[in-house]
């Protein structure tokens, strides 16, 4: 009996030992893939057995089960944007099945959505496309979406005040560049042709990525996409995978900056179950008055110094001396952004997404106007934009079950409610003017793709309806008495309706040749009514227009070898006149009044571009792109007559009459060059250079086209180590000479020097250190030399030396 008892006990011990070893072995067969620098999980990394060909995919936590992989096999770990790792099973075991991937500076496998509305490799598209990845946005650590764009070195951004930013793509700006957010067009019926600051209402802190398509995008996106498309994709809620019932994520940061006393706080939280998930995001920013650089070159003199500001003291406007002229008084503002998204996965083929966004700001002073002087006194005591309120609600249906009609389908229904307002009061005057615009925008889009042998077809339809209500009035700030005032847009209301269908096609003839083409038909209807013509006796009381447009594109990609890529692309673009073009009454620059022109026609572009890319050993990429755009019936601001008069009295000032007109012809040409080099696995160099030249050719001689930026670019030196990332970079702009300004247009020569806008450069450094997987410290020093400069066409000077400190946490 003792012998049997001993045998049973030893068998029990042996069983427990086997269970223990089996458990240990099971744990070791789960591999975790992390970013080497940030220690964050790499989702959707592909793990392949070199010999067995077994495939596994990492989930949201960067984990994948490799228990089915033979121990003798080598394992290949790939993820887009990272260097591929090939490791033996025993090597993985020695690493405790924890793999750190090194980021690549460029990737031919990068996938984008913007160019065709469906996932597609950049390498398969003839257009120039840039992608700003979420980890790069975090490292940029910029204050607004406009600043993110400017930091790329490929997008020029104008600013009229600190609370703004107007991106320029290939010489096109404002309503000639299309902004898309989560598949929904942001451009509306009152997007103006001047400098547009609306991009700051998009919260970059919750972006999944930003895609920029350069050149006409009218085939896929319709009107306004002349210079290109900026597509902002917010994060989607993540579902729990099979390894857990619930997934929770928290990302938060606090940032402070010295140039404008910034305090920004952000938090986004995800809670996901197997079939439903929720994402909540909130960002609040408070900015003080902006300090400009103090080190000046001989051409600037006292240009841009803020010698005075206006305060109302004891009921009287007082002109006060600014103790520090480098502090730009009246640039301070605050802003908050809220997002809520809900994802419901009906089954593996069908997703439903609800998307709610709200953005609002404090009053934002129009800084450029507050610096205007007349006879040694300020022109304005107050000029500010009221809170810019943007509400978006959207429902998205995604279907990925292949049938006869499509492989993937997406339908988006959305509604936006937008409020904008402008308020101004002259110095020593008691009358405060108020002008307010309210917009309701409904959009319905449906997009599908279908693959037939080597042919990929993408097609869809879109309907957009805009309603604009414009009101105005005056207020006596002493007595409270109110009175009438001319509205910015027709006071009887305006409506714009657009219907469109499109189809695009891609054919990969063979490994060396890809063909891309597309066609779109659009119908646009606009109506606007003037009721009160007391202030301006227009010879008409209603504007009605119906326009039809057919646009197309044809592109080729030649791949003569793994180291070469050549693109040829021809495309047309169009933009229908909107309510701002046809019905606006506004003082664009001091002494210039814009009046309606009901005879405006759509403007068209015909663009040809070619690009050559050279890849050397998969570590160096050289790229050059040249484009030429013929610009027909270009809508530009030109001298005009109102009832036979070339000057009229507006807001108490005799002002020259201007109007938006269709210039006979214009052209824009330019180039973009870039260098991307992985010098070592840890050190890389990136450099971009952009040049644009534009002229109006309809007159006796060529005249400058407005919105054309000077030569500009960016060069950076990057270091990525375990838990550390550093970058030293240079931003630079060339001269914009006076003779290259469009004096009658939107180039704001009044805010430049008598020579134009001088060239400038800044030296900058930024770093990030991952203290542990949950905590990161970022420190940046921008404009190290404290250089004074002002970006071309801007009414506010750029920040001086700026120390930025951010603490970022994740759970």
Image (cartoon, rainbow, N blue to C red):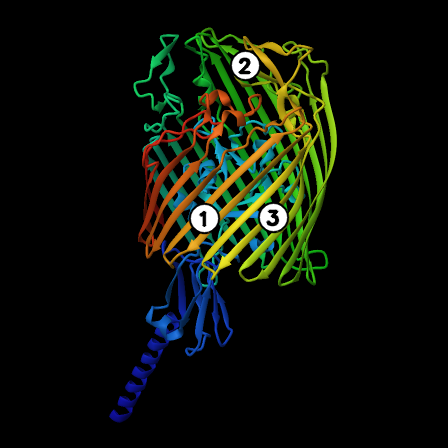
Q: Are marks 1 and 3 in contact (CB under 8 Å)?
A: no
User: Image height check: is 322 above or below 160?
Assistant: above
Q: Nearer the viewer, mark 1 or mark 2?
A: 2
Q: Earlier in the sequence, mark 1 or mark 2?
A: 1
Q: Which residue is mark 2?
A: 591
**Structural crowding at the residue carrying mark 3, measured as other residues with C-alpha within 10 Å and reported as few (<14), some (14–19) or many (≥20):** many
SS category of the residue bearing label 3: strand
Identify which residue, 556 or 147, lies in the foreground.
556
Residue at the image point whose x is 67% and y is 29% from the top? 577
Q: Which residue is mark 3?
A: 610
SS category of the residue bearing label 2: loop
Q: Earlier in the sequence, mark 2 or mark 3?
A: 2
Would residue 287 appear left or right of 492 to someone viewing this image? left
Residue 486 seen from this side: no
Q: Quadrant of residue 372?
A: top left
Residue lying furthest left in this view?
Answer: 2
Residue at the image point whose x is 29% and y is 90% from the top? 7
Q: Nearer the viewer, mark 1 or mark 3?
A: 3
Q: Distance of mark 1 from mark 2, alpha carbons?
A: 44 Å
Residue at the image point whose x is 33% and y is 71% from the top? 94
User: Image height check: is 309 above or below 710?
Assistant: above
Residue 337 in the image, given as x and y percentages of width and height: 46, 36
Label drawn at residue 706: none
User: Image height check: is 764 above or below 450?
Assistant: above
Q: Which residue is mark 1?
A: 134
Image quarter where the N terminus lies is bottom left
Residue 144 in the image, given as x and y percentages of width and height: 44, 36
Residue 558 in the image, given as x and y percentages of width and height: 62, 57
Q: Distance of mark 2 from mark 3, alpha carbons?
A: 42 Å
Residue 416 seen from this side: yes
SS category of the residue bearing label 1: helix
Identify which residue, 280 or 635, lies in the foreground.
635
């Amino acid at each position: 009996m003792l012998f049997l008892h001993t045998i049973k006990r030893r068998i029990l011990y042996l069983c427990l030992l086997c269970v223990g070893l089996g458990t240990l072995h099971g744990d070791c067969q789960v591999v975790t893939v992390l970013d080497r620098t940030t220690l964050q999980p790499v989702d959707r990394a592909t793990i392949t057995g070199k010999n067995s060909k077994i495939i596994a995919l990492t989930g949201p936590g960067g984990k994948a089960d490799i228990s089915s992989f033979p121990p003798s096999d080598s394992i290949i770990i790939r993820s887009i944007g990272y260097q591929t790792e090939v490791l033996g099973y025993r090597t993985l075991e020695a690493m405790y099945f924890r793999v750190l991937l090194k980021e690549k500076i460029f990737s031919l496998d990068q996938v984008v959505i913007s160019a065709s509305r469906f996932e597609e490799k950049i390498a398969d598209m003839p257009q120039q496309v840039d992608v700003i990845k979420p980890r790069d946005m975090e490292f940029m650590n910029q204050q607004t979406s406009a600043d993110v764009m400017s930091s790329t070195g490929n997008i020029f951004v104008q600013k009229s005040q600190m609370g703004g930013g107007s991106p320029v793509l290939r010489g096109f700006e404002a309503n000639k560049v299309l902004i898309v957010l989560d598949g929904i067009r942001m451009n509306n019926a009152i997007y103006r042709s001047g400098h547009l600051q609306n991009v700051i209402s998009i919260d970059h802190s919750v972006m999944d990525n930003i895609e920029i398509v350069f050149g006409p995008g009218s085939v896929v996106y319709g009107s306004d996409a002349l210079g290109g498309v900026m597509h902002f994709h917010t994060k989607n809620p993540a579902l729990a995978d099979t390894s857990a019932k619930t997934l929770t994520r928290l990302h938060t940061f606090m940032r402070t900056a010295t140039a404008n006393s910034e305090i920004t706080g952000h938090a986004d939280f995800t809670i996901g179950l197997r079939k439903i998930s929720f994402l909540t995001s909130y960002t609040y920013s408070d900015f003080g008055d902006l300090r400009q650089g103090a080190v000046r070159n001989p051409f600037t003199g006292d240009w841009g110094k803020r010698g005075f500001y206006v305060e109302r003291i004891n009921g009287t406007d007082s002109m006060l001396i600014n103790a520090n002229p480098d502090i730009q008084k009246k640039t301070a503002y605050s802003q908050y952004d809220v997002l809520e998204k809900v994802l419901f996965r009906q089954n593996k083929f069908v997703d439903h997404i609800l998307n709610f966004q709200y953005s609002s700001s404090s009053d934002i002073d129009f800084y450029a106007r507050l610096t205007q002087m007349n006879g040694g006194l300020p022109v304005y005591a107050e000029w500010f934009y009221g809170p810019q309120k943007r509400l978006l609600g959207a429902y998205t249906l995604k279907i990925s079950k292949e049938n006869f009609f499509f492989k993937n389908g997406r339908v988006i229904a959305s509604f936006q409610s937008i409020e904008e307002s402008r308020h101004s009061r002259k110095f020593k005057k008691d009358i405060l003017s108020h002008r307010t615009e309210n917009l309701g925008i409904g959009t319905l889009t449906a997009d599908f793709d279908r693959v037939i042998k080597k042919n990929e077809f993408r097609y869809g339809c879109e309907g957009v309806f805009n309603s604009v209500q414009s009101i105005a009035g005056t207020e006596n700030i002493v007595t409270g008495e109110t009175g009438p005032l001319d509205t910015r847009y027709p006071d009887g209301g305006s409506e714009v309706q657009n219907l469109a269908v499109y189809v695009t096609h891609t054919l990969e003839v063979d490994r060396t040749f890809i063909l891309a083409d597309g066609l779109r038909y659009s119908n646009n209807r606009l109506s606007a009514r003037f009721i009160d013509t007391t202030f301006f006796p227009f010879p008409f009381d209603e504007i009605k227009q119906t326009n039809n447009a057919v646009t197309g594109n044809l592109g080729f990609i030649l791949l003569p070898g793994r180291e070469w890529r050549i693109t040829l692309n021809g495309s047309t673009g169009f933009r229908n006149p909107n309510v701002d073009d046809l019905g606006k009454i506004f003082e664009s620059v001091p002494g210039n009044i814009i009046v309606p022109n009901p005879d405006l026609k759509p403007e068209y572009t015909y663009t040809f571009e070619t690009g050559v890319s050279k890849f050397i050993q998969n570590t160096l990429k050289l790229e050059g792109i040249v484009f030429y755009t013929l610009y027909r019936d270009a809508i530009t601001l030109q001298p005009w007559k109102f009832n036979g008069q070339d000057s009229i009295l507006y807001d108490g000032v005799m002002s020259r009459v201007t109007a938006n007109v269709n210039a006979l012809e214009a052209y824009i040409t330019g180039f973009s060059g870039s260098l991307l080099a992985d010098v070592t696995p840890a050190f890389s160099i990136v450099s971009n250079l952009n040049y644009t030249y534009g002229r109006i050719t309809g007159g006796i001689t060529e005249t400058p086209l407005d919105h054309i930026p000077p030569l500009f670019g960016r060069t950076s030196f990057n270091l990525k180590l375990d838990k550390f990332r550093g970058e030293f970079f240079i931003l630079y702009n060339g001269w914009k000479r006076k003779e290259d300004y469009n004096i009658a247009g939107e180039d704001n020569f009044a805010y430049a020097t008598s020579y134009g806008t001088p060239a400038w450069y800044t030296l900058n450094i930024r770093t990030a250190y991952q203290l542990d997987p949950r905590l990161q410290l970022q420190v940046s020093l921008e404009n190290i030399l404290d250089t004074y400069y002002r970006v071309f066409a801007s009414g506010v000077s750029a920040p001086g030396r700026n120390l930025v400190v951010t603490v970022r946490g994740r759970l």
